[in-house]
Image (spheres, rainbow, N blue to C red):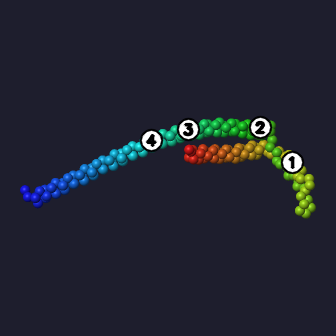
């Protein structure tokens, strides 16, 4: 073999080694990349599982608290309804009465000076018809129920906002 042939064979072997080396480096890099990717996915899944467990615990605690509040609200509602029925019954039978307010005369001072005496004492007016008085009590109870439900919504909102603000 001549010197040129040996150089040519050496270059072919060198080129083959370089190609094999490049393929080996590429395979090694790809396997390392995949291993890193798999580790990151595994770590992310573990973190997700921990976060999901913490969220489930927080949610179950909040749901238990809200169930307790709902049970208390139901008990109070039933108590209010029983008291309303008793009050309406007393008004219908005449045991209790609702009175109309009597208009209090306002003492006016001459010109733009304030009055010295102020308003007089409020006196009771005539009794309201028992059936109408019972309806008034029912309307007042409906309004009070709306206020209580609004307060419960505000409490739930504040609980959720405090939960979301969290640590």
Q: Residue at x 72, y 37 (%)?
A: 83
Front: mark 3 or 2? 3
Name the disc covering residue 90, or none.
2
Q: Residue at x 82, y 45 (%)?
A: 99
Q: Residues under labels 3 and 1: Cα distance?
A: 52 Å
Front: mark 2 or 4? 4
Q: Name the residue under label 4.
A: 49
Q: Residues under labels 1 and 4: Cα distance?
A: 68 Å
Classify mark 1: helix, strand or loop.
Answer: loop
- Closer to the camera in the image, 58 or 166: 166
Which class describes the residues within 10 Å of circle 4: few (<14), some (14-19), or many (20+)? few
Q: Residues under labels 3 and 2: Cα distance?
A: 43 Å
- Position of 10 with respect to 70 (left or right) is left
Which class describes the residues within 10 Å of circle 1: few (<14), some (14-19), or many (20+)? few
Horizontal and vertical percent position of residue 97 = 81, 41
- Closer to the camera in the image, 104 or 89: 104
Q: Name the residue under label 3.
A: 61
User: Could you tell which of marks 2 and 1 lies nearer the N-terminus?
Assistant: 2
Horizontal and vertical percent position of residue 6 = 11, 56
User: Could you tell which of marks 1 and 4 lies nearer the N-terminus?
Assistant: 4
Q: In this view, does 1 lie above or below 139?
A: below
Name the disc covering residue 122, or none.
1
Front: mark 2 or 1? 1
Horizontal and vertical percent position of residue 95 = 80, 37
Q: Residues under labels 2 and 1: Cα distance?
A: 25 Å
């Amino acid at each position: 073999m001549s010197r040129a042939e040996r150089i040519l064979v050496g270059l072919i072997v060198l080129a083959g080694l370089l190609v094999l080396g490049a393929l080996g480096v590429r395979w090694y890099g790809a396997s390392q990349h995949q291993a890193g990717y798999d580790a990151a996915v595994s770590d992310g899944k573990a973190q997700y599982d921990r976060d999901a467990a913490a969220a489930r615990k927080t949610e179950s605690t909040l749901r238990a608290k809200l169930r307790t509040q709902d049970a208390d609200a139901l008990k109070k509602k039933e108590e209010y309804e029983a008291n309303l029925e008793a009050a309406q019954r007393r008004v219908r039978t005449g045991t209790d009465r609702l009175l109309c307010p009597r208009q209090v005369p306002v003492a006016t001072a001459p010109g733009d000076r304030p009055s010295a005496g102020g308003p007089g004492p409020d006196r009771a007016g005539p009794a309201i018809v028992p059936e109408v008085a019972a309806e008034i009590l029912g309307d007042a109870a409906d309004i009070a129920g709306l206020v209580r439900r609004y307060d419960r919504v505000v409490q739930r909102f504040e609980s959720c906002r405090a939960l979301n603000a969290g640590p």
